[in-house]
Image (tube, rainbow, N blue to C red):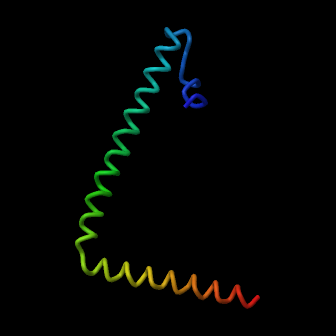
Amino acid sequence: MLAFIPQFVDPLRGGVLAQFLLLGGVIALGGLLVNGAVGVFAGGVGRALAGSAVFQRWLSRVSAAIFAGLALRLALMERN
């Protein structure tokens, strides 16, 4: 933020510290709102997916495939 905000601060328009604090507060509030919305949305989607038997089945299959691929890679690394 210290590299971003100074380009918007104009010493001719009043106190520099007040401008820094105001712009920093606006950016912090925007970040809070956006990150809060993402968190709420992700929590809702996570709860919905956690209760889905179809999703759990696919998650198990994908996890098994990933672990099988890692095991195969490890087995091939031992040969070299």
Can you say whether 71 is above or below 5 in the image? below
| Number of on-image labels | 0
Task: Name the residue located 54 percent from the left edge and 27 percent from the top edge.
Answer: 5
Image location (x, y in percent) of residue 15: 50, 9
Image location (x, y in percent) of residue 58: 35, 81
Q: Quadrant of the C terminus?
A: bottom right
Task: Name the residue located 50 percent from the left edge and 10 percent from the top edge.
Answer: 13
Image location (x, y in percent) of residue 53: 25, 79
Q: Quadrant of the N terminus?
A: top right
Can you say whether 7 is above or below 54 in the image? above
Q: Nearer the viewer, residue 13 or 61?
A: 61
Judged from this view, the residue extending furthest toward the right is 80
Can you say whether 42 is above or below 35 in the image? below
Judged from this view, the residue extending furthest toward the front is 78
Left or right of 66? Residue 76 is: right
Q: Quadrant of residue 75?
A: bottom right
Task: Name the residue located 33 percent from the left edge and 45 percent from the top edge.
Answer: 36
Q: Nearer the viewer, residue 9 or 63?
A: 63
Can you say whether 42 is above or below 5 in the image? below
Task: Name the residue located 31 percent from the left edge and 47 percent from the top edge.
Answer: 37
